[in-house]
Amino acid sequence: MKAFCMINEKMLLRNIHALFVSHSHVPPVNTEEPLIHRLPVELLQQVFLLTAADVLDCPSIFSFGETTISVNVASPPLVLTRVCRLWRVIAHSTPGVWSHIQVVFSGRIRPLKPFLPHLLKCWLSRSGSQPLTLRIAHKREDHSEFKIHSEADSQLLDVLFSERRRWETVIMSPIYYRSQDFDTPQLRTLGCCWGDFRRFDAPNISRLYIKACYCCKNFQIGTRISMCKKKLHLRHLHLHAACLRDIHHFSDFSPSGDHRGG
């Protein structure tokens, strides 16, 4: 019995030695490398996408001081590119991170420095062929002077409208822009004032939010609809500051879907 145990012990030691030798070529784990750098690239990309999607009202590209406009590097996705080289490469190669953007107009008469419109172009180019979600707002909440020509705003609008065929969701304040026809074949969701809506050629729109603004307040909804020759196939309609007659008129114009007034 004692000899049998000695034989088994020798066999066990031999097997352990063989196992050690067979795995001796495996390199040791680099304990100095941060754990997050050991994650698969695909997982980091998902983290970046969720981070960008969690930003309220879309990630904003600019930040404003009292008299200055600068790049907003404090929020995604730009902040992700400033952590390290690995994160910058992954962020730049993830188009979905750059497909949501908020652009706030300053209303400045003077043109912007070339760097800022160029940054906007780079942001949109990073999104590849992804459908775009845009939020276009004004620095000032009072839009009564939005018809005053702003060279700075026109510079940014030129960049945005160059990608209008990729617009899928757009929420916008009243804008002053020379073009009267907004060709947006991929547009599904639109929030704007009536004056801007009339300029959209959006055959696939299904969700529409019409906001009241000073330039449209003297027109009845029914009059505006009769001026619009678009055939709509809406599934959701929200009219801001609308009466029941307006809702009924619009329901005749777009018979399907959910219609609400507020």
Image (tube, rainbow, N blue to C red):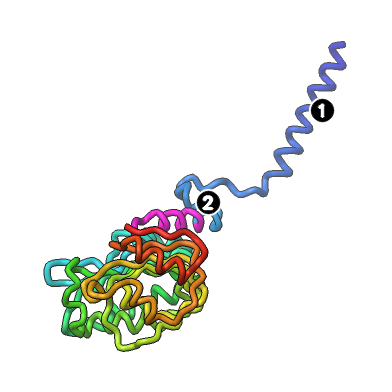
Question: From the viewer's perspective, is 216 left or right of 187?
Answer: left
Question: From the viewer's perspective, is 190 left or right of 111?
Answer: right
Q: Residue 11 got which mark?
A: 1
Q: Which residues are magenta?
A: 45-57
Could you say which quadrant of the image residue 9 lies in? top right
Could you say which quadrant of the image residue 226 lies in? bottom left
Residue 51 part of the magenta segment:
yes
**Where is the C terminus found, in terms of image quarters?**
bottom left
Residue drawn at x 33%, y 77% as measured from the top left: 223
Q: Amino acid at mark 2?
A: Leu
Give percent across and percent down for residue 200.
41, 79
Could you say which quadrant of the image residue 194 lies in? bottom left
Residue drawn at x 46%, y 79% as measured from the top left: 230
Residue 83 part of the magenta segment:
no
Give percent across and percent down for residue 98.
43, 67
Residue drawn at x 50%, y 61% as measured from the top left: 257
Closer to us: 182 or 52: 182
Crowdedness near tag 2: few (<14), some (14–19) or many (≥20) residues, C-alpha within 10 Å: few
Check disc 2 and report the residue beneath it. Answer: 39
How many numbered marks, from 0 up?
2
Q: Amino acid at mark 1?
A: Met
Q: Earlier in the sequence, mark 2 or mark 1?
A: 1
Q: Residue 92 got which mark?
A: none
| Secondary structure category for the residue under label 2 | loop
